[in-house]
């Protein structure tokens, strides 16, 4: 196996909601969902916040073959995203517009979709879970 780096997102108690959202917005296919109370080994004493027993301990989903791992973390403070963004790259401008609109629902547009010197269709959005996305069609403009 070659080296692989995958994003692992923590949603601070909103992971199932995020999985449902990405399935609707991006056509994500959820592969695995394991709740804390389904773990074969108990959590260390005091590690899990009260009420997180039915939260997502681990999940995996793909978007057009790209895998993302996700969890609720062990407490609500484990959510929040800063200092990075995920890039949704597609060959179709129509798909870029569709994905951008879907990710924008309940979120905030940081840069509207537009033609740039590196892409015929590029924009930045923060979704309703505070995850930052760059949506783009690769290529250069003439």
Image (spheres, grey):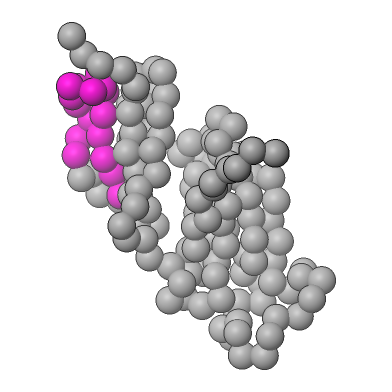
Write the residue at 61% across / 90% down: 46
Q: Main secondary structure of the magenta part?
A: strand
Could you tell me if residue 6 is visible in this image?
yes
- What is the quadrant of residue 135 in the picture? top left
Write the residue at 36% across / 61% down: 81
Residue 36 image offset from top left, x and y in percent:
69, 71
Residue 120 image offset from top left, x and y in percent:
25, 18
Q: Is residue 48 left or right of residue 111?
A: right
Q: Does the magenta stretch include residue 5?
A: no
The residue sitting at the bottom extreme is 45
Name the quarter where the C terminus is drawn. top left
The residue sitting at the right extreme is 40
Report the span colored magenta: 111-126
Could you tell me if residue 102 is visible in this image?
no
Please tell me which residue lies in front, 74 or 54: 74
Please tell me which residue lies in front, 77 or 119: 119
Vertical placement of 68 versus 35: above or below?
above
Write the residue at 18% across / 24% down: 116
Please tell me which residue lies in front, 100 or 119: 119
Residue 56 image offset from top left, x and y in percent:
62, 64
Vertical placement of 55 versus 68: above or below?
below
Name the quarter where the N terminus is drawn. top right
Residue 107 image offset from top left, x and y in percent:
30, 50
Write the residue at 51% across / 77% down: 75
Q: Is residue 42 left or right of residue 53?
A: right
The residue sitting at the front extreme is 2
Q: In this view, does 49 lie to the left or right of 84?
A: right
């Amino acid at each position: 196996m070659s080296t692989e780096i995958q994003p692992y997102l923590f949603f601070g108690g909103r992971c199932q909601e995020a999985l449902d959202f990405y399935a609707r917005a991006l056509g994500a296919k959820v592969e695995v969902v394991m709740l804390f109370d389904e773990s074969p080994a108990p959590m260390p004493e005091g590690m899990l916040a009260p009420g997180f027993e039915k939260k997502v301990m681990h999940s995996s989903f793909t978007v057009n073959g790209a895998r993302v791992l996700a969890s609720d973390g062990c407490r609500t403070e484990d959510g929040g995203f800063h200092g990075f963004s995920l890039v949704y790259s597609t060959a179709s401008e129509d798909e870029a517009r569709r994905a951008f609109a879907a990710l924008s629902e309940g979120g905030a547009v940081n840069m509207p979709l537009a033609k740039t010197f590196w892409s015929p269709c590029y924009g930045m959005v923060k979704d309703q879970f505070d995850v930052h996305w760059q949506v783009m069609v690769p290529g250069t403009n003439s």
